Image (spheres, rainbow, N blue to C red):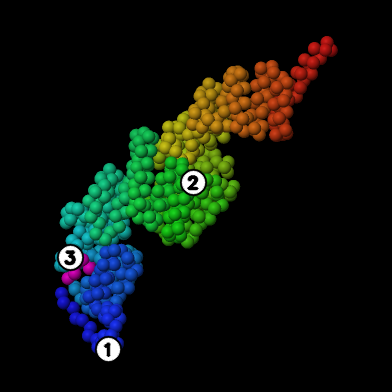
Amino acid sequence: MQFKRFLAIIPVSLLLFPSIAVAQEKLVDFDYWASLCDTLLQAEDYEKALEACDQAVGLFPNDPEAWKNRGDVLFALARYGDALVSYEQVLRRSPTDSLALAKRCASLTALGRTDDAVVACEEGLEIDGDWGEGTPAIAWYNRGVAMTQVGDHSQALESYDWAIRTNPGYSPAYAGRCSTLAEFSRFEEALKACDRAIQADNWSDINPTTALVNRGRILVQLAPTQDTSQEALTFYQEALKTYDEALAADPDNEEAWTEQGTVLGLLGRNTESLASQDWALTLDENYALALANRCAALNRLGQYTDAQAACDKALQEGDDRWNRIGSAYAWSQRGNSLAGQFKYEEGLTSVNRALTLNPTYEQAWINQSTLLWLLERYDEALVSTQEAIDLNPESSRAWYNRGRILTTLREYEDAIVAYRMALEGDAQIGGQPSLEKIAINLSAVLWRAGRYEEGVRAAVEAIGLNPDSALGWYNRALNLMSNRQYTKALEAYQKTLELNPNDANAWMGLGVTHRALKEYPESLAALTKALELNPDNTQAQENFDDVTKILEDLQNEASGG
């Protein structure tokens, strides 16, 4: 297509200085600016490309190709309203440009005008006019995005499938199919679609990171469905690898950062999890999901005041971008942070809000049970825990909470069952509560139930997970002493005190064990230390008085008194 050139009278001064003449000529050379616009667009130098595109359309407003390139630049800069204006300028000059209609559809979708978007895409398909370097797959894909936006996943899937029929190698359609199949919980098919998108590597102007992020999400959703915890762990590790690939391709993808951080948190890598959330928020400080994820990471690290601030910001200033759980996630985590600050009633109100928004949110039921337990509303706490278990029978945290509540109610046998179920659940992949913590609690309740040999085994399991577990060694000693294995108990108490020299109960246990072995001077020394650390320890005081009397009697016998 030949375009009109602007004519200009060249001053004599420019004839004397050719370089100036060339520079001035560029200012009025439409072909130069149009070509530069296209070149910089392809090079993804969008800010400079926009300057060149503006020059081009300013010199020759009737060129649809320049307007299209300008629209593509603005779309890449996420200036969707301005991009829409440019695409509409294309259509004023070329009404049968189906590619421009498809891109108008994409802009309308990005602006939330989904009804208008669907009309634009369908008009482009009906006209089936000029597709330029594109294909009808672009329109079908954008129609699918619009349908996804309004929650019509069946229509979205149909659109993506039509896009694939039109262009079997079109990666964005496979990526869209991947995310839509996940909405129907067809995770295996979804994973295959994402893999196909990545393998085809035909993205047009769509960000290829989309498929990698979707693939990571699918792997995270598949993990809990695996037969063993080791298999689940493999899926989480593969998800992390996928998010790493996404971030290598697009380091500014805040969704990949926050979702990577979520997986790290599930694996108990809480410091790394927090760092990923902070990166996401560096890119978008009001990203609601990243703020809520930051709140969750801080809760796991015990930084409850900062956690509440992050949750509050997510709810009050966040951009309303959530995952499938919705804002219930932030309300539930806010309840956790308030519990950590001993604000139990306020925390319960926050968690109740989460359950009003999402009654099938398992973690909110768990958090509610914790707060009810702390408020000594034990029967209600058990009901909440059962709700969580019904939603996810593999939830170690739900079973662990049940064990704690039953222990408080002195229903030790049922508590033992709950803790054993917690050990078999999803805690095996990492996260909270840790296997060590569950085993420690199990050993304690076994001791309360008088099942000392099993209590020793549970304590040994905790020590195997963490050889420096002072509580593990203490529980081992307590069960050994109660089972009259005094010499072994003595060794376990001594190891406890190596790890925690200021444990008054361990000093008392050491003193009682020495007393059982009739090592009275050693017993008295240990009990004295226990009372120095805790003068209100009545059991230590009673043993101290008894051992003191025994030593006095022995001294009297030795002196013949």
Frontmost of labels 2 and 3 is 2
Q: Which residue is located at x 41 percent, y 45 percent?
A: 263
- Compute the Cα span from label 2 to label 3: 49 Å
| Residue at image coords 55%, 48% | 303
Q: Is residue 76 above or below residue 52?
A: above
Disc 1 marks which residue?
A: 12
Q: Which of the 4 quarters of the picture holds residue 34?
A: bottom left
* Mark 2 lies on residue: 271
Q: Quadrant of residue 159?
A: bottom left
Query: Which residue lies most toward the right here?
Result: 561
Q: Quadrant of the N terminus?
A: bottom left
Q: Which mark is residue 174?
A: none
Q: Position of residue 517 (x, y in %)?
A: 66, 17
Q: Amino acid at mark 3?
A: Trp
Going by the image, does 72 lie left or right of 498?
left
Figure quadrant of residue 396: top left
Q: Which mark is residue 131?
A: 3
Mark 3, secondary structure of its residue: loop
Answer left or right for 460 relative to 185.
right
Q: Amino acid at mark 1?
A: Val
Magenta stretch: give its range: 96-101
Q: Residues within 10 Å of mark 1 (few under 14, many from 20)?
A: few
Tell me the CA gap for discs 3 and 1: 47 Å
